[in-house]
Image: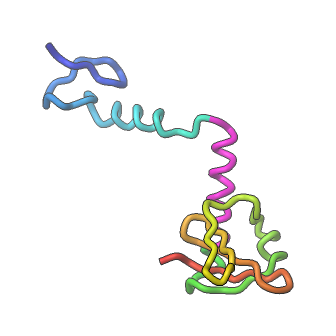
Amino acid sequence: MGKNCLECGEKIIGREDKKFCNDACRNTYNNKLNKDTTNLMRTVNYALRKNYRILSENNPEGKAKINRKRLLDLGFDFSLFTSIYVTKSNATYYFVYDQGYMPIENDWFVLVKKN
């Protein structure tokens, strides 16, 4: 009694725990499984990647300062971030993965990177 490939249905030859007949079927199956299923997910993930790229390109040393107008000119979307961190002194940092920003005085932001 043999097993069949999860992607193409062909009979599998080889190890007992094998699930796919070859690497192409394994890749195709996993790509289908992990693709963004809706336009909303694709749009949000694209915008998060863009926000991340903007923060990281403007924060090469791990700590920098930038103004709101510059971030907006670069296409930064302030409504999209992955987490919020509030310090003991009640300062609020917004993070896009490991790149963060915190509003300070007069439309300026401090950029930080989580280690």
Residue 49 lies within the magenta run: yes
Q: Is residue 85 left or right of residue 74?
A: left
Q: Is residue 66 left or right of residue 41?
A: right
Residue 93 in picture, x, y percent from top left: 66, 74
Residue 18 in picture, x, y percent from top left: 21, 31
Residue 109 in picture, x, y percent from top left: 74, 81
Q: Nearer the viewer, residue 97 or 28?
A: 97
Residue 19 in picture, x, y percent from top left: 26, 29
Color scheme of the displayed model? rainbow
Which residue shows up at 67% across the image and 64% down it? 51
The range drawn in magenta is 38-55
Which residue shows up at 65% across the image and 52% down it? 46
Quarter of the rendering containing residue 84 = bottom right
Which residue shows up at 30% across the image and 37% down it? 23
Asked if residue 32 is positioned above or below residue 53 in the image, the reply reads: above
Asked if residue 84 is positioned above or below residue 21 in the image, the reply reads: below
Farthest top residue in view: 1
Quarter of the rendering containing residue 86 = bottom right
Residue 52 lies within the magenta run: yes
Asked if residue 51 is positioned above or below residue 15 in the image, the reply reads: below
Which residue shows up at 69% across the image and 47% down it? 43
Secondary structure mostly seen in magenta is helix
Q: Is residue 64 left or right of residue 70?
A: left
State which quarter of the image contains the N terminus: top left
Quarter of the rendering containing residue 90 = bottom right
